[in-house]
Every structure is written in structure tokens, then in C-alpha cells.
Image (cartoon, grey):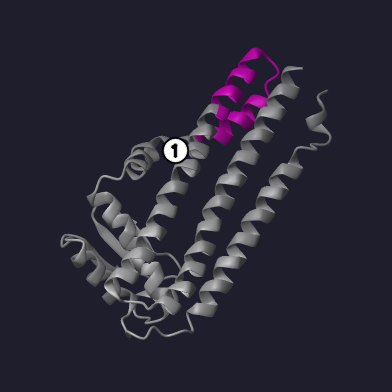
Amino acid sequence: MPYYYYFDPTYILVIIGAVICLIASAKVKSTFKKFNKVRSMSGMTGAQAAERILHAAGIYDVTVQHISGNLTDHYDPRNKTLSLSDSVYGSASVAAVGVAAHECGHAIQHQQSYAPLTIRSAIVPAANFGSFISWPLIVIGFFITSSTGSLLINIGILCFSLTVLFQIVTLPVEFNASNRAVRILGETGILGEEELRGTRKVLGAAALTYVAGAASAILQLVRLLILSGGRDD
């Protein structure tokens, strides 16, 4: 009987990925909490800063709305809606303004047809389907000892690869949005140079969560490939 029925040493890759994600999550939360206590000198809230940035970029068809939650901020290109969370929408902190500007960066990417964002949007349906179907196929495949089982596993791994691809494509999208945010905040004078240092730290910590997510997905893919190879042997 194959070794993975008894002990799976590759599970260490999953643990490493989980630890990386936990560290990144803790980092962004602590950094945001620190700079959420620093009020911007302009006194503009996240929502007000978002409106000003969008209008400065010539964007008037994006709706800025308030959503519940903490750091649940996002831009939806499907309906051109920029959603800001409880800790960002009405807050005038350096952290809140930075996060709002980051989401505006996505709206500007959409307006300018930024290639990585276009690619990411195009693969969302495939990535969602791959994430949904991959594990059932892989688990069922490992319980079937015939060639059919190997086929199901390989199809499952291929589907999971779409999720990994999405994570990788997300990286340039997020880094570019953060770079745009810092530049725009400086050019518009919404934040001063000293305040921008804090914003860079907040957005830098947020970017690490995407790097951690991609790393975790890649480690999981490597694990699946090792298990699949062990089964074939």
C-alpha cells in the first residue's frame, strides 16, 4: 500500500504555507492598526480621498460605497463599484486613506485596460471552477487504484493550477495598484511626505498577504505533484 496512506511527509509544505499566510495576515493587521491611529493632516476620510482621486483621474462612473467588515475593501470592475470597509470609509487616518487610494488604483487600472488586470478578470471564472472541482477530483482519484484514478488526479491538479495561476497574476495587479496609490496621494497633496511613509508600510504589508497566498498555493501544487508521482511509482 502506498506511503501516503500511512504518513504524508509532504504535509510539511501545507504547514509552511499556512504559517507564511498567518505571519503575513498578522503583519498587515498590526501595521494597519498602528497607522489607523495617525490622522491625516488633510482630514479627508477614505471615502472623500477616493472620490477626489477618481475625479482627478477623470473617472466619474465609479460608485464609492460603504460595506461592513474590516479590511474587506475591494473594487469590482463588473459594476464599477469601489467598496470601502468600516475602518476605511469614514476614517481620516493615514492607513484608511492609503487603502482607499489602493482601491482607486484598481479602478484606474480598469479605465486604462491594464493588461494584468484584464488577464486576471478573464481567468476568474476558470480559477473559481478549478478551485471548486480540483479537490473532489483529487480525493476521489486517490481512492481509485486504476488508471482512472490517475487520470482524475491529473485533471484535478490541472484545475488547481488555474487557482495558482490566478494567485500569480494577482501579484503585479496589487503591486501596481499600491504604487499608483502612493504616487497619486503625493501628487494630489492628500498626504504629505511623512504621511506617505506610513502609507507605504501599510500597503507594503498588505502586498505581503498576496505574496504569501501565491507562495502557499505554489507549495500546495508542489505537494500534489509529489503525491501524484509517488502514486505512479
Residue 87 in view in this figure: no
Which residue position holds label 1? 127
Query: Where is residue 11 drawn, in percent x and y?
Result: 74, 41
Secondary element at tag 1: helix
Q: Quadrant of the C terminus?
A: top right
* Residues rendered magenta in the picture: 133-157
In percent of the image, x 78 and y 31: which residue is there? 4
On screen, residue 58 above or below 150? below
Front-most of residues 111 and 124: 111
In percent of the image, x 69 and y 55: which residue is there? 19
In percent of the image, x 65 and y 61: which residue is there? 23
On screen, residue 186 above or below 59? below
Magenta segment includes 34 = no
Query: Where is residue 36 drawn, in percent x and y?
Result: 47, 79
Location of residue 187 (image quadrant):
bottom left
Taking the image as shown, residue 179 lies to the left or right of residue 147, namely left
**Residue found at the very far top of the displayed protein:** 147
Q: Amino acid at mark 1?
A: Ala
Residue 144 in view in this figure: yes
